[in-house]
Image (cartoon, helix red, strand yellow):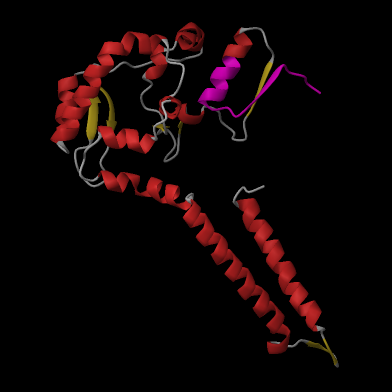
């Protein structure tokens, strides 16, 4: 049996990067991946027709260019075929499925704000303010980019939705946060209490009907009737099996 210093679960971007840095430090590393390919969010595959390759996830690698560990690893990756294409103008884009032109992030802050202003001039002005504020601290931020944006917001004690809502004033913003608000509502004590009570009534209803089933639908084998306890017990057993299957599929255990 092979023995490794470290086993990394998952051959995605983070797993591969972690494994590469550990291997560079002299550790023996094994990466295990359930799919027949590796790459995670940086994978390119033929998903439509043979010969047509699609970038499935990350189309722009921005922050990684500021990472000192990546820069140390980049020459080795380039020997294996890594090649970055640096755009002359636009950096990335966000399509609009409703038919609008979408938002394009350019190297030029003026052109970027023009793209945002098509949807909201207030958001464009706010984006420029964020850009100007970030310019004051960008050198320190790039050197000490140790936490993800999500982790930074958690440490600062502010919810992500609150942070984004403060920045974005688009009139359609509520649609963007409805699902998040729904999930937060489900976690409230009132919602939990309501669902516990509803579950109690559902169990009471099921038990009542299971106990009535032998009287409503008696089963007969030959000349003998199946005992009521056996019929009710079979219902309870099937209920338990289905409940366990649903919880298993939902990842509860």
* 251 left or right, relative to 143: right
At horizontal 36% and vertical 38% (from top left) the residue drawn is: 161
Q: Toward the viewer: 133 or 72?
A: 133
On screen, residue 2 above or below 235 = above
| Residue 113 position by quadrant | top left
* 219 left or right, relative to 61: right
Q: Toward the viewer: 145 or 98?
A: 145
* 20 left or right, relative to 217: left
Which x, y percent locates residue 50? 44, 36
- Can residue 89 be spotted in the picture? no
| Residue 224 position by quadrant | bottom right
At horizontal 67% and vertical 74% (from top left) the residue drawn is: 207
Q: Toward the viewer: 181 or 10?
A: 181
On screen, residue 246 above or below 221 = above
At horizontal 42% and vertical 11% (from top left) the residue drawn is: 144
* 230 left or right, relative to 34: right
Queried whether the magenta region covers residue 4, the answer comes back as: yes
Q: Which residues are magenta?
A: 1-20
| Residue 204 position by quadrant | bottom right
On screen, residue 176 above or below 153 = below
Which x, y percent locates residue 62? 36, 19
At horizontal 55% and vertical 28% (from top left) the residue drawn is: 38
């Amino acid at each position: 049996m092979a023995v490794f210093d470290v086993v990394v679960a998952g051959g995605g971007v983070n797993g591969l990067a972690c494994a590469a840095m550990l291997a560079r430090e002299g550790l023996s590393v094994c990466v295990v991946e359930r799919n027949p390919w590796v790459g995670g969010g940086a994978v390119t595959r033929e998903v439509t027709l043979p010969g047509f390759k699609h970038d499935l996830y990350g189309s722009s690698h921005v922050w990684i260019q500021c990472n000192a560990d990546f820069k140390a690893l980049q020459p080795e990756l380039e020997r294996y075929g890594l090649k970055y294409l640096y755009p002359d103008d636009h950096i990335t884009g966000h399509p609009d499925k409703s038919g609008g032109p979408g938002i394009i992030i350019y190297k030029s802050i003026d052109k970027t704000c023009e793209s945002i202003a098509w949807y909201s001039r207030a958001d464009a002005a706010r984006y420029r303010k964020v850009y100007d504020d970030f310019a004051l601290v960008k050198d320190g931020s790039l050197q000490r980019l140790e936490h993800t944006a999500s982790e930074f917001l958690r440490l600062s004690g502010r919810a992500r939705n609150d942070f984004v809502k403060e920045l974005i004033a688009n009139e359609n913003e509520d649609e963007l946060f409805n699902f998040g608000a729904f999930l937060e509502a489900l976690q409230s004590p009132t919602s939990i209490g309501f669902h516990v009570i509803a579950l109690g009534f559902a169990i009471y209803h099921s038990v009542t009907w299971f106990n009535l089933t032998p009287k409503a639908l008696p089963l007969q084998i030959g000349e003998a009737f199946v005992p009521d306890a056996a019929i009710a017990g079979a219902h309870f057993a099937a209920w338990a099996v289905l409940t366990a299957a649903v919880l298993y599929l939902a990842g509860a255990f």
